[in-house]
Amino acid sequence: MSLKKARVEVNNAVFSLPYYVARDQGYFAEEGVEVELVPAGSGRDRDQDVPNKPIADHKLVDSYGWHRGIEEGEFSLYRACEWGQIRRTQDSGQGARVISRRAAVTTQAIIVAPESPFNIPADLKNKTVAVNFHAGSHYVTLGLLGGYLQKDQIKAVHYGGPKQRFQAVSDGTVDAAAVMEPWISVAEKKGYKLIAETYYEGAEVATPSLDPEAYAAIDRAIKRAVATLNQDLMPYLHYLCAEVPKEILDLNPEDIHRPRLRYIDPRAYTEAEYTQIFDWMTSWDLLDSESVYDKIVESKIPA
């Protein structure tokens, strides 16, 4: 019997690590699906995809960013932060829908340079924080600083991917930046200061072209990969380290603080969970008020 087929985007390794494990261990094939992992960015060079200066208005930045391939038919399934996935689903012209929570529960941290005078979130009042608009760094920054500052005192600015945001802090282009692993470990090893840090979840998004049986097989394989990662992360941390150029830091698996990496079984996205996020996003004018649960979440995909 031939295998079901699916093309799946993989972005930053910390978010897609279960997919690499499922591929490397042969779990996809054993579950009856042939999965092609498609790198995020559609061949674009992120080093060349940096604005001339930080962008302060999120409405000037496309919500899809490096995930536009799902709108262009390059893949049928991908994962990112839950807020961004909700926004991109709202903006989809291909009928993409949120189908589950993702397996990765990871952290994002706001960092400043070693010599920075800033030490606590309140110190970042009216200070620029580099983020990637409509991605986890953007929403996490608003959430982390919102407990200390008024909305108009939070100055999140768009500057691209985590490497670009880290470099913007290093060269003084911005006052701070929000980054995920492995860049938090890079920052710590180089003596940068962490101002705030939090865990957050993400979501899987699929187009109607994804075969339900293929998704069910992928889901089973990812759950096996989660169990493998929870037994031992170390054999797979090289995927994270490979994202850091040697000229910035020679990062080794031993340098990564493993408790920051949590992997759990994907699960359904409930209406109660969605409503809480919906209320928060609309309060920040990041989502249309018409984007209710039934328009964003597909709850009929088999697990």
Image (tube, rainbow, N blue to C red):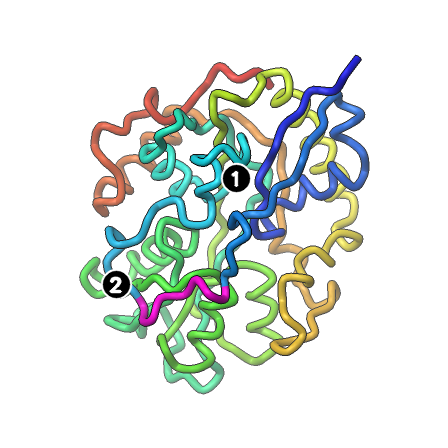
Residue 280 in view (yes/no): yes
- Name the residue at 18% across, 61% down: 152
In depth, the one of 116 and 168 nearer the eye is 168
Residue carrying label 1: 79
| Residue 61 placement (x, y as % from top left) | 30, 53
From this view, report whether residue 110 is shown above or below residue 275.
Answer: below
**Secondary element type, mark 2:** loop
- Name the residue at 54% across, 48% down: 40
| Residue 206 placement (x, y as % from top left) | 49, 28
Per the picture, the main secondary structure of the magenta-coloured stretch is loop
Quadrant of the rendered image containing residue 254: bottom right
Furthest-left residue in this view: 152
- Name the residue at 55% across, 27% down: 267
Residue carrying label 2: 56
Image quarter (top left, top right, bottom left or bottom right) of the N terminus: top right
Give the magenta range.
Answer: 47-54
